Amino acid sequence: MIGVLLLNLGGPDSLESVRTFLFKLFSDRDIIKLPVPSFLQRGLAWTIATLRSKKVTGYYRMIGGKSPILDITRNQAEALERFLKTDSRLQTPDSTLSYKVYFGMRYSPPFIKDMVKKIMDDGINKVIVLPLFPHYSQATTGSSFKEVKSVSDEIGVHGSEVRVNYIESWYDHPKYIDAISEKITEGLKKFDDPEKVKVIFSAHSLPKTFIDKGDPYLRHLEATISGVLERVCPISWHLGFQSRSGPVKWLEPSTDKVIDRLAEEGCKKILIVPISFVSDHLETLYEIDILYRKMAEEKGVVLKRTESLNASPKFIEALGEIVLTNLGRLV
């Protein structure tokens, strides 16, 4: 039996859990290193979470009262398991192979630590750890792997006969690039004159210190965009960064500033591609669909967004082939 563990950050499953989610997020120095000594981070994180919770709770109320990421990730896991079990294109040397797909979150249930323990309880001895972050960053993939390894050490996984393969990134996988390109092509069709549309690839921002220390996130993003540009019709594109939080210096330019600049230059049509997000969450449903769209409308700009990959067939196929190509490393 091959176990596949999908990793994501998670999100609040109710309005009441927003503050707890924010506290866990701001407590994690691997993702947000607040400008205080490490032993003070949790205290400052609770203060920040308390101060921000009312406003952020309002955002979640606008998108249905919770984050959809739990349901979407569950759908992705179920769809991937079906694909691995039934798709005839996934031929393996050992036809007896079977698969079970799990998913774990960093900051909300089901937590990564609980899923690692469940995998062991289920008797799985070969595990592929697949982050739902195409582009490697220490803040996301790195910190999630750290959590998996910490729990594994705690319960003695690494001292057993269990084989584990960690997939660090898949930003340039052809099927993943195909899936994004498909969404862009569909998105451009929403406009009467797609040749006049400006495309903004909007990625989750990252503290600039990460890049300065060698984090490959930005380089991976650029490689993904390069692959997409080889597949879609010629487009005028820009890269922006969104979803900054915390008192540190982040990657620039911000997506809202790109929208402002394009509007000033006379642009009337914008298609946003949430390039680093594979699932709908607050960043797409509120930040892009509500905040940025309203901002654009006030400037006379029609702003639309490509659909997120979520559990689309082409994306699930990409995940399936990523798993397949990594089976050999479990031997």
Image (tube, grey):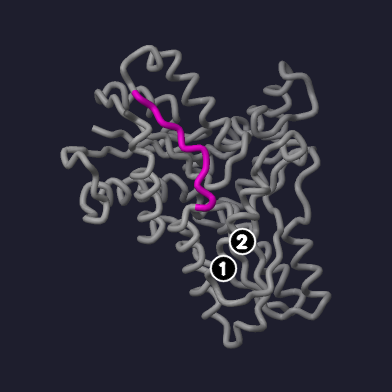
- Which residue in the structure is indicated by mark 2? 226
Residue at x-position 24% and y-position 44%: 92
| Magenta segment includes 171 | yes
User: Hey, what amino acid is under mark 2?
Assistant: Ser
In depth, the one of 56 and 220 nearer the eye is 220
Position of residue 263 in the picture relative to residue 309 (left or right): right
Q: Is residue 93 above or below residue 125?
A: below
* Quadrant showing the N terminus: top left
Residue at x-position 56% and y-position 51%: 60
Residue 25, x across and y down, in percent? 61, 34
- Which residue in the structure is indicated by mark 1? 230
| Magenta segment includes 198 | no
Residue at x-position 69% and y-position 29%: 45
Residue 140, x across and y down, in percent? 58, 37
Residue 207, x across and y down, in percent? 74, 40
Magenta extent: 163-172
Q: Secondary structure at mark 1?
A: loop
User: Hey, what amino acid is under mark 1?
Assistant: Glu
Residue 202, x across and y down, in percent? 65, 59
The answer for how far apart the CA atoms under marks 2 and 1 are is 7 Å
- Badges 2 and 1: C-beta atoms under 8 Å apart? yes
